[in-house]
Amino acid sequence: MLAGKRILLGVTGSIAAYKAAVLVRLLVKAQAEVKVVMTPAAGDFITPLTLATLSKNPVLSGFTNGNSGQWNNHVELGLWADALVIAPASANTLAKMANGLCDNLLLATYLSARCKVFFAPAMDLDMWQHGSTQANINKLISYGNEMVSPEYGELASGLTGNGRMAEPEQIVSRLHSFFSAANRLAGKKALVTAGPTYEAIDPVRFIGNNSSGKMGFAIAEEFARQGAEVHLISGPTQLDLHIPNVKISRVKSADEMHRLAMRYFPETDIAVLSAAVADFKPATMATQKIKKTDTGLTIQLVKNPDIAADLGKIKKDGQYNVGFALETENEQANAEKKLLSKNFDLIVLNSLNDPGAGFGHDTNQVTLISRKHEPKKISLRGKKEIAAELVKIIIEDIHA
Ligand code: CTP
């Protein structure tokens, strides 16, 4: 799986830098092409000569090569890599990455890299537990980076706890699963609805909701990463995605979303209905701004089309539909009912009772209920990680 893959290894200033030598050795043995970028502090722990010899490539550290007038192009390096692995990732580098600082070649390469980024933290236990380190890590994960978690054990300080860098074998195995999973949806077409819908009351007012669209955008991105061609139909959100195989159609109302979804569904292999569609809309939209009166205002609402249910009705063999349910009581039973009534193949049960989960948050906590599997609970995680888990289960289901 790793043969011919281009792995850019970033090494930072941590005592675990000695493990980078073993990591390079394992990657080269697996026939990957390896280049190493070191931060200036990494040189205090391991020599460039060691890593250059093992990787069979010059090790890069500064923006320029001494006085040669040549510079190390971080953009080219970022584009060259199929995966960037930062191991060990020190607390300092993680903090800079989380905040977009780029005062060394590795950080500039990280900021410009388009490939998947893995980071394997290594630090002392108190640094690891510190709120700022944890906040930086959550931020990095929310940007789509993947962490190879540190392990519990004896640390260089003599203390025992979390913070020890994952073993090189474990990092290689993560890369292995990443490359074997990629492109499993090549040739498939996915349709994703995301965000809220706005139902116009008059030219300046609407009925809407707080959905941010983050979950749907993360799912669209993950589908694209797995090789699918994605059509994302989004209600009004601040979000954007610039990925070649994701087409975004922006809509406002449930009617517009319904029209587009019905049009594109026949050619779709997988549909994920993650939009928070307004159940009702004003019976009529006032053509002029409604003036206030002393007597109050009654707006008559009528039902919106149910996009998920309508797609479920025309779903053919071989198509796979996923819905979301937001429940506050009898959660699983209600979600299972919805799975059947809307003809979903899988439903993602959101529990609003959980802190940190749901609308507007970067994190979520869900249970995936599929017709083919036992329900799978996913504890509080970044929406991008949940999207990755969801897409993984969809892939398993459609290949089962
Ligand atoms: N959905 C849709 N079109 C609608 C309403 C909902 O496509 N008009 C989809 C949502 O995108 C989601 C699922 O249906 O996938 C949610 O179903 P819904 O019945 O609205 O469930 P809840 O939001 O949980 O609300 P309720 O329990 O009140 O039915």
Image: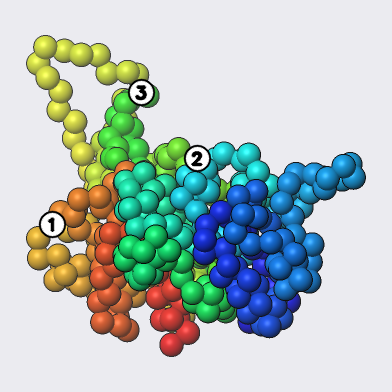
Label 3 amino acid?
Answer: Val
Q: Is mark 2 within 8 Å of ligand 1?
A: no
Q: Residues within 10 Å of mark 3 (few under 14, many from 20)?
A: few
Locate residue 70: give its quadrant. top right
Label 2 amino acid?
Answer: Asn
Q: Is mark 1 within 8 Å of ligand 1?
A: no
Q: Is residue 197 above or below residue 325?
A: above
Q: Is residue 3 left or right of residue 334?
A: right
Sequence-first disc among 3 and 1: 3
Residue on which the image places disc 2 = 99
Report helix, strand or loop for mark 1: loop
Single out the mark in the foreground, 3 or 1: 1
| Residue 136 in sight here | yes
Whole-angstrom CA distance, mark 3 to mark 1, is: 33 Å
**Which residue does the image show at 75% across and 44% down from the upper left?**
63
**Which residue does the image show at 12% across and 19% down from the upper left?**
296
**Residue 129 position within the rendered picture, expressed as x and y whole percent measured from the top left:** 32, 53
Locate residue 316: give its quadrant. bottom left
Q: Is residue 3 left or right of residue 312?
A: right
Residue on which the image places disc 1 = 328
Q: Closest to the observer: 153 or 250?
A: 153
Q: In the drawing, what numbered circle is on residue 343?
A: none
Sequence-first disc among 2 and 1: 2
**Residue 74 position within the rendered picture, expressed as x and y whole percent measured from the top left:** 73, 49
Single out the mark in the foreground, 2 or 3: 2
**Which residue does the image show at 28% across and 59% down from the upper left?**
380
Q: Residues within 10 Å of mark 2 (few under 14, many from 20)?
A: few
Q: Is residue 42 above or below residue 183?
A: above
**Residue 95 position within the rendered picture, expressed as x and y whole percent measured from the top left:** 47, 45
Q: Residues within 10 Å of mark 1 (few under 14, many from 20)?
A: few
Report helix, strand or loop for mark 2: loop
Label 1 amino acid?
Answer: Thr
